[in-house]
Amino acid sequence: MEKKNGFLAELNKPIDMTEGTPWRKILSFTLPMLIGNIAQQLYNTVDSIVVGRYVGDNALAAVGSAGPILNLVLVLFIGISMGASIVAAQFLGARDRESLSHTVGNSIILIIASSILVTAIGILITRPMLELLGTPDSIIDWCTSYLWILFGGSIGMAFYNIISGILRGLGDSISALVYLVIACVLNIILDIFFVASLGMGVNGVALATILAQSVSAVLCVRRLFKMREYFDMGRKYFRWNKRYGMAIIRLGVPSGITQAILSMSMILVQSLTNSFGEQFIAANVIVMRVDGFAMLPNFSFGTALTTYAGQNFGAGDMKRVERGAKEGLILSLGVSAAFVALILLFGRYLMGIFTNTQELIDLSMQMMRILAVGYVAMAVIQSLAGIMRGAGDTVTPMWISIAQQVLVRVPAAYLLCYITRSAEFPIGRQEMIYVSLLLSWLFGAAVTIFFYRKGKWKGKTLA
């Protein structure tokens, strides 16, 4: 029994990325997070499967149409999570216990404040935003109630996202995996119970989501409080400290803005998507759910490299940062290519999980093929941007993302649809929505490589 407990303790031990072979450290950190992100994607995907199967294609469209607005309001959590992760990683690498303790305390203050703000703003803007986007009358009421319930339970989302960011900064990617799996299983059970048994429709899906995420939030907080060997939890650390609180905000705001711009561009494109009707909206939901799985290696390696760079910058080892960047990028490209190949081979079966409508499956697979090459480009973007963020330069990735969306994605979507109008396609060819996305990814990869090689991010360390 002692050996078993010793093994589990070693498995659950946070990873120190300042020592050992870089690619091994990056891979050992990434794999649990990749599995956890798969669980997170399942968490979101189950909602779509349940409503698509038990309620219908319109309910599936409703859940998907709500997504961009939800993501726009939740950018605050994403920004604070990124900032807390970077600050925690750098102070851990520098072995600065006092500063790390203040970072944890101020992060919790920011969690409470941001969740109150998100709940208030989310409930107020939901209906007006849906009307502004031209959401079809057949699904707008479902969209509204779905979002109101999610925003009402946003404190669970806040605690999970931000505390898990701190855990990653401390080198712990295992705990987030375990808690996500627990939440995913609970979400599936509650989805089926609320929708299939109680007939609650999209409201049941939203309620299941916030309950499951609240459980994972409690578990994350419990895990954090057990990591007392790295920081202290005295009362003085739970008072606002401008130095640490503003460092989290300063590093997190660019990531939050990046996500906000992405969400705004999705909203603008969603308005164009809505003009193609409920069937294309539903197909778009299916594609985005499968797209989420294709993106998982990119996001996982990007987050791992942020932690890697943060810890090694804190330790002052620039050569190790650069070596890890090269090895991490190679790993990311290889795993991403494998994921894309699997989705192209078996994507039709994945899409068949969401709906029995063959036209929807065919349309969704057609769009997925357009995006395939872009996932390799996204591996480059996420990996190199992860290194820059970990070094404390969250501004450069922000501007690159803004350029992707503002200069390429949105204009290209509307322009390509406009120039492909015909008697058969009065609004334009619907696949241009995805061609514009592919173009933005290719542009982003080229610009990210340029700024990474320019090297200004190397002088941004915080600790």
Image (spheres, rainbow, N blue to C red):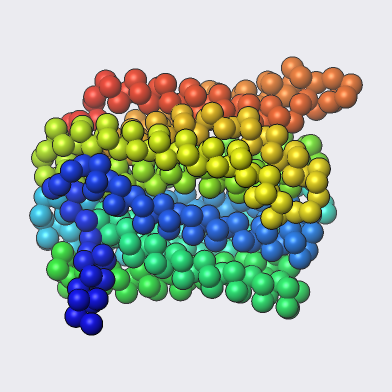
From what the image shows, is residue 106 above or below residue 309? below
Relative placement, left or right, of 264 versus 399 is: right
Question: In the rendered view, would you say 408 is above or below 18?
Answer: above
Q: Residue at x 68, y 44 (%)?
A: 348
Identity of the residue drawn at 60% across and 74% down: 189
Quadrant occupied by the N terminus: bottom left
What number of labels is visible?
0
Which percent across, then down, holds residue 6? 20, 73
Q: Residue sitting at 69 percent across and 21 percent down?
A: 416
Location of residue 177 in the rendering, given as x and y in whole percent from the top left corner: 39, 62
Which residue is most to the top?
419
Residue 280 placed where, x, y %? 76, 41
Which residue sits furthest bottom?
A: 1
Image check: 359 left or right of 434? right
The one of 260 and 328 positioned closer to us in this rendering: 328
Question: Which corner quadrant of the image does residue 201 belong to?
Answer: bottom right
Specify the quadrant of the image occupied by residue 462: top left
**Residue 193 to residue 264: above or below:** below
Residue 6 appears in view: yes
Residue drawn at x 33%, y 33% as measured from the top left: 330
In this rendered view, identify the residue nearer to me: 96 or 285. 285
* Residue 392 visible to an observer of this rendering: no
Q: Is residue 192 above or below residue 448?
A: below
Image location (x, y in percent) of residue 109: 32, 64
Q: Nearer the viewer, residue 208 or 371?
A: 371
